[in-house]
Image (cartoon, rainbow, N blue to C red):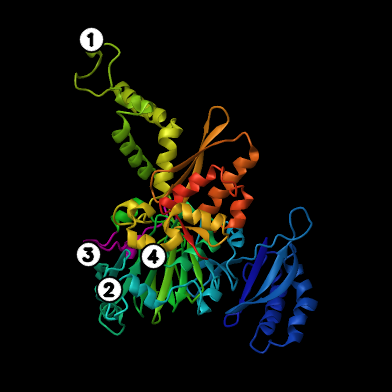
Amino acid sequence: MTRFVSISQTNCGIHRQRRHISAVRKIFCFGILVWLFSEESQNLSKTRFCSAFLQPVCLLTHPCYSSVEVISTRNCRHLHLKKVSASGGGYVDAGIHPPQTDNNHNTITTIPSSSWNATLFASTKVWGNEPLLLRGAFLKDAQTKDSAFPSWRDIIDLACTGNDDEDFLDDEPTIPSRLIAQTRPGQIDSFELLGFGPFESRRYLDRQLASGKDTATTLVVNDVDRWIPDLSQWMDDNFASLIPRWRRDDAQISLANQGGGIGPHVDSYDVFLIQLSGTRTWELGVNYRVSVKEEFENLIEACSENGVRILNMTNILSKDSATAGQTRTTVKIQVEPGDCLYLPPRVAHWGTATSEKCMTLSVGCRAPSAADLIARLSETIILDAATASSLERVHQRYTEKDVGSMDSLPSSSFLSPDVKKKMKDLILEAVNQVLDDEDAVLDPLIGKIVTEPNRFAGDLSSYPVPLYDLDKASKTELGVWGNAKSALEEVLVNGRGSFKRAEGVAFAWSYIEREGSYRTYRMYAHGRDAVEFFVSIAGEEHENAVGQLMDRIANGLPLNRSFLESIGMDSAANKLHSFLLELINEGLVYGTDE
């Protein structure tokens, strides 16, 4: 593993000193390090001094480490101590910073000044366990003018139905959005939901978001990746190797000027908070989690009545940890453009814009709860119990094995332990039988629930729009891409363009084993019924081709002629043609000149 010993330029100190170091050695090393990392120590000779002199000193005081480097970051410099692996050969270099201490003596683990790397993030083992701050993880994207990050004006436009400009049409589609205001800045119970979008005009939103008013307002817009393809591709590029596509929620972007925020709250899933522009202060609960029960007990009633779920942090922080007996504490950090803050589920957090034009992207990692799955299973049982043979068990009713044994009970109306056990067994046996039907129940239940959108308003078939639902004018405008067969011919035969997955749509695929070496492959998307493909798996090569196609679509990679030929789709007899044609007709995959 790697260990950084942080030496701040303003408050020099050595963290985690070994207890066996003598007081004299501590004072000696501390004095040398103060000199080395002072403002005057910028010359090369002192950096060389670190290698020539401080390395043996640090190794003497930290005998479990094998080498020392000086590493500069945006705000401080570090001694980089590399630890010998357990086998004694080579280094295990994770590149992470131990918990950083702020002025209030609270901690958060930090990776300083490093470009985003999913492998590095995974190696920290913080997933689901503790917050992590990645300084400058997306700094290049934040600083590049033509990056995938949308502008402030882009987000305003998405939240409006109309505009004062002539080039903005009233009938353009809009996405879920809401305005949240703190009507009395400094008072946590003054958050209000001003309304849901679509909003009437740019001018209206500009007035609401303007700073210098008595209220501090935030605009929150969801599903941004549906309407900005570059952002959707950026999310695929950076998170596809970290979590499955069906685990990734929409791109939510919040806009606020100085003082804006949405108050203390918790999320039930992992989330990455990426600062796109401006600065923001985050306050985090670092040594506790807020349970669902505790959240509901501590929602501020005045805010809930106004449509905003805000935690009463005075109550939350006053409770000691039931397990460790620790006082609950918070850490306060400032983030800048390009910084990324990871939070595991149920961590209390609240952000406040500390500059104008503060934009924050939230990438959540959704997952169904047991309650979600049970509710969906109940719907399946209610809707399909009369027709599915595997659901026959749910019709069975409670009955006694014999009658005439009431004399042994304290009362004729008494619910005995035996009765309750029999009813429990009745439920469990019925549910187990239902879930054992992978083909008709379990597979579609999971495939549809993990891909359905969380906030989509309206019929799931309305986005993406199927080709067969387009009017004649729209198909004409699309040209060759307005017809599935001509589109497939354009890519496969003419070698022009490619197919892409619809933006902002979660995909997941599976297969069901059949008798006689057959499989039914299924592609789930957007909570819809699966698109199926029945194939013999006698040939391993063909089986691999199906898996490659499914993976490439789900992960958002383009389907060009080169790839399609590599999996044998250049043959007109290839059965994958019909599968891809159905995806195109459903609007889940579309053709493009790119």
Instruction: Identify the mark nearer the N-term, 3 or 4.
Output: 3
Mark carried by residue 306 = 3
Instruction: Identify the mark nearer the N-term, 2 or 4.
Output: 2
Element carrying mark 3: loop
Residue 502: percent from the left, percent from the top? Answer: 44, 58
The residue at 62%/57% (across/down) is: 562
The span shown in magenta is 299-325
Mark 1 sits on what residue? 404
> How far apart are the two marked residues, 3 and 4, measured between alpha carbons?
45 Å
Instruction: Identify the mark nearer the N-term, 4 or 1.
Output: 1
> How far apart are the two marked residues, 2 and 1, measured between alpha carbons?
68 Å
- The amino acid type of the residue labelled 2 equals Gln
Mark 4 sits on what residue? 477
- The amino acid type of the residue labelled 1 equals Gly
Instruction: Identify the mark nearer the N-term, 1 or 3.
Output: 3
- The amino acid type of the residue labelled 3 equals Asn
Element carrying mark 2: strand
Mark 2 sits on what residue? 182
Residue 342: percent from the left, percent from the top? Answer: 49, 63
